[in-house]
Each structure stands twice: as structure tokens, then as C-alpha cells.
Image: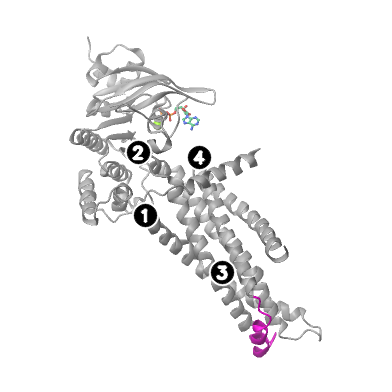
Amino acid sequence: MKLLFNIGRYFILLKRVFGKPEKFSVYYKQILYEIDSLGIGSLGLIAIISVFMGGVITIQSAYNFTSPFIPLYAVGLGTRESIVLEFSPTIVSLILAGKVGSNIASEIGTMRISEQIDALEIMGINSAGYLILPKIVAAMFINPFLIVISMFLGILGGYLMGVASGACSSYEYIFGIQSFFVPFNIYYSITKTIVFAFIITSVAAYQGYYTSGGALEVGKASTRSVVYNSILILIANLVITQLMLVG
Amino acid sequence: MIEVKNVHKAFGDRMVLNDISFVFETGKTNLVIGESGSGKTTMLKIMVGLHNPDQGDVLYDGRSFTSSSEKEKQEVRKEIGMLFQGGALFDSLTLEQNVAFPLDMFTDMSKSEKEDRVNFCLKKVNLEGRNKLFPSELSGGMKKRAALARAISNEPKYLFCDEPNSGLDPRTSLVIDALIKQVTEDLGITTVVITHDMNSVMEIGENIMFLYKGNMWWQGSKKEILTTDNQEILDFVYASEFLKQLKPRK
Ligand SMILES: Nc1ncnc2c1ncn2[C@@H]1O[C@H](COP(=O)(O)OP(=O)(O)O)[C@@H](O)[C@H]1O
Ligand SMILES: [Mg+2]
């Protein structure tokens, strides 16, 4: 029952989020602000994680490909595919669900309990649209760039650490990452990223928007947003993969 | 003029407002007083549409508000300024951005017009020159004053204040009371102030409504409140021993 109630209320909130904006110029400014705060603000974290994960994937692949029938350039190929198909879009989105999602939930939750949302409503502003729409639009726009940067840094990290650790040679790795490239995989990853961006921002905003009580509840809303986001991202990942790669 | 007509409100099976009717007059500071928990905030939230009443209506200069559509409500709300109990300033905006917010949203003023208006409002609440501060850098009294500046920046026709001087020292309270009264008279607007502070009642109470356990118990002016023999009012007004000694004898 509670689940149905939340799903219903989530979609009612979404309907308000996509209502007609009061003034487009104000929304435009908010979107730019959110792109900076949600997107550019996450760049450092994503860069560090991507380089290290790329390195580990390369070393693990080399460790596993010991059969003489598998050519060594498969290490580069395998690293590229892991990063492009799964690591960058899904794992990075999960990390963003933690960082950006909890941030959104606590920001909006705090605005709710300190009556800032009421203040917006009283002024005659659609608070759901004003607060949430710019975040959704900003994340759906900027996250694909973050993911592409993550792919690049992951593959670079694989190269640096793979060569440094002697897991494979520079020539084999570079040959590997250029082999059997399927452009469709990039579309698939970007599609996933955009869907995940929508889930992260809208679910986190929902949790924050319906906070009631005090600081304790804001903390709980923030935790809930991370939990639900993680589960929903994994489910969406499965569905999109089935639809795009198999179906 | 704002008319409240036969408003009922219950939360669950708890009756909070029971058949309230009242007329809030234009150009006056109208007070809603009563003990804590008597339903004052609920009444205010119903008037501005943050809660829906179970029964009854609120009329803004004859325009029915409660039963109107969300769009019509938004139109009326553009004429409303509200000072929340905790200020409710936007944390991510500076003082001047907070005050300019209603102007950004609802007017086509040029940058310099907005600047002038913001500085005018900040001056009115004695916060001139503090434009660039964030709400977290303000004291409680300054927050309330800043919130008042935001509430009046877009020249509202109706001003609501929920306990504008709770938690403030007596001097700052007086400043805020005086400001509210002055703004009301200058702009000729309909002001509704919730308070449980007898000082405010005596300072600015022109048209007073006394709520008692969710009922509209008494109404009158600040002169009348001192001489009434309604027992619940007397208990409220002369709550302290000190005030009891000041009670006029008939
Ligand atoms: N959202 C709500 N849900 C349930 N009960 C509420 C809610 N808001 C207020 N109440 C109850 O209504 C009564 C009146 O509250 P309120 O209007 O805030 O009083 P006041 O502002 O006069 O102190 C209180 O008993 C309070 O517990
Ligand atoms: Mg109250």
C-alpha cells in the first residue's frame, strides 16, 4: 500500500515538475547553475575513480587471460568494453546517486522543513517546477559528458597502470582498444546514462520534497534517496540492456 | 479586505478550527491572538491556501480563494507577502537576491530599478549595506527583518506575519512591530499578524481576533481588550503576576 502511495505521489509530483514555468529566463539561469553544481562539481571524484578502476580492470584482465590462445591485445579490448558498457555508465551513475542524489534530497528537504518551499508557494510559484526541473534537465544534459570523460580516463588509467605493472605492452593495449569497435555500444551507454540521470535527480528530489519534521528526517530522506536510487538504477540497467542489446 | 467565512478544519479526528468567521480590514494591522496550539498558524495557512479547509471559504476583496483553481490561486498569491515564523529566507541566495526574488519572478523591472527597490526595502528594515550577506550570516532579528523586506518588495496588497517577534529581544520586537504598522499604513494594505505577545497587541492591535481552542472567542480593539470581562481573555492578557497588578480597576 505504502509503495503504491509513493509511486502515485511520485508521478503527481512529476506532473507538477513539468508544468508551465513562470518565467523562462529564471529557469535558464537555474539550469546553468545546476550544471555547474551537479556536473562540474562531480568531475574530480569521477576522474579519480575512473583512472583507478580502469587500472584495476586492466590488471585483472591480464591476470585472467593466461591461455596462449587468447592474444594479449584482448586485455585492451576487454578493458575498453568493460568500461564503455558497464563501468562508466552504471558504476559512475551509482556513485553519482550517492553524491548528487543525497545532496539534492537534503537540499530540498531542508528547504521543506524551514518553510522555504511554503514561501515559494505563497509567492505563487510552482515550487516543484522551480526547484526540481532545472536539476533534472541539468543532470540529463551534463551526465553524458561526465560519462564520456570517465570512459576516456578509465581507458587511460588502464594504459598507464597496465604498462607500468607489466600486465601488457603499450603496443598491445593500444592495438586492443582500437579493435572491433562497435559505435552502437556508445549509444547504449549514453542512453543508460540519460535514463539514470533522470532517475537520480527525480527520485532524490521526491524524497526531499515530501520530507516532514526536522533535521533527523532530512537525514533519513537523504539515505532513502540513495537506497531507492541504487535499486532503481540496477533495475533500469537490466531492462535497458535487455531491450537494446538483446531484444 | 479579507473575509474568512465559516471555516472548519480538523487534522484526523482532532478539531483545530471550529466555524471561524472574521473580517480582516484594509489599511489596518489585524491581529490573530491566542495561546500556543489554539490554531493560529493553521488559520493563516488556510487563508493563503497551504492547507485546505474542510468547510468554508476565504475571500480576497470579494474574490473567492479557497474554491478557486490552482491558477487563480497563483494570481491572488502574487499579491500576497508573507513573513514566516522562521523567516524562510532562501539559504542559497544573498540578502539582496532574496529581496529581489519576487521582482525577478513577477516583474519586468530593469536591473537598476530592481536595485533601487531592493535598497529601498532593505533601508526600510534597517539593513542597508548588508546586501551581500547570506542568511546564515544573519542574527535571528536580522533574518526576520530581511524576510519582512522580501515580503514587501513586490508591493503586496495583503501581508501575513506569523509571530514576527517570537524569540526576539523586546527592543527588536518593537522595531519589527513598528515596521509592520508603518508598512501597512504607507501602502494601505491588509495586514494579518499572528502573535501571542501582549506587547505587540498593545502596540499595533487595531482589529483583534482571539482564538480559543479553535473557536473564534472574542473580537475588538486594543482598548477594548483591557476592559473586557471575558474570563479566557483575562487569563491570556493578564497571564503574569506583573501584568495583573497593572490591570485597570473599574
Ligand atoms: N499538519 C498538521 N497535522 C496535524 N496536526 C496539526 C498540523 N498542524 C497543526 N496541527 C495541530 O493543530 C493545532 C493548532 O496548531 P497551530 O495552528 O500551529 O497552533 P498555533 O499556531 O496557534 O500555536 C495543534 O494542536 C497542532 O498540533
Ligand atoms: Mg504557530
**Separation of residues labelled 1 and 2 (CA atoms):** 19 Å
Q: Which residue is mark 4?
A: A213
Residue A191 at what x, y percent from top left?
60, 64
The amino acid beneath tag 1 is Val
Name the N-terminal-most of marks 1 and 3: 1
Q: Quadrant of the N terminus of chain A?
A: top right
| Numbered circles on residues, count | 4
Q: Is residue A164 above or below residue B224?
A: below
Q: Is residue A136 above or below residue B62?
A: below
Query: Tags 1 and 4 in contact by the CB under 8 Å rule?
Result: no
Q: State yes or no: Cβ of the residue under disc 4 lies below 8 Å from any atom of ligand 1.
A: no
**Separation of residues labelled 1 and 4 (CA atoms):** 30 Å
The amino acid beneath tag 2 is Glu
Name the N-terminal-most of marks 1 and 4: 1
Q: Quadrant of the C terminus of chain A?
A: bottom right
Magenta span of residues: A162-182
> Same chain for marks 4 and 2?
no
Q: Chain of mark 1?
A: A
Magenta stretch holds residue A163? yes
Q: Chain of mark 4?
A: A
Q: Which residue is mark 3?
A: A147
The amino acid beneath tag 4 is Gly
Quarter of the rendered image showing ligand 2: top left
Residue A147 at what x, y percent from top left?
56, 69
The amino acid beneath tag 3 is Ile
Q: How would you rate the neighbour count of disc 1 (Cα within 10 Å): few for under 14, some for 14-19, many for 20 or more?
A: some
Q: Which mark is residue A26?
A: 1
Q: Is residue A61 above or below residue B214?
A: below
Q: Which mark is residue B75?
A: 2
Residue in the picture at 21% in, 35% down: B178
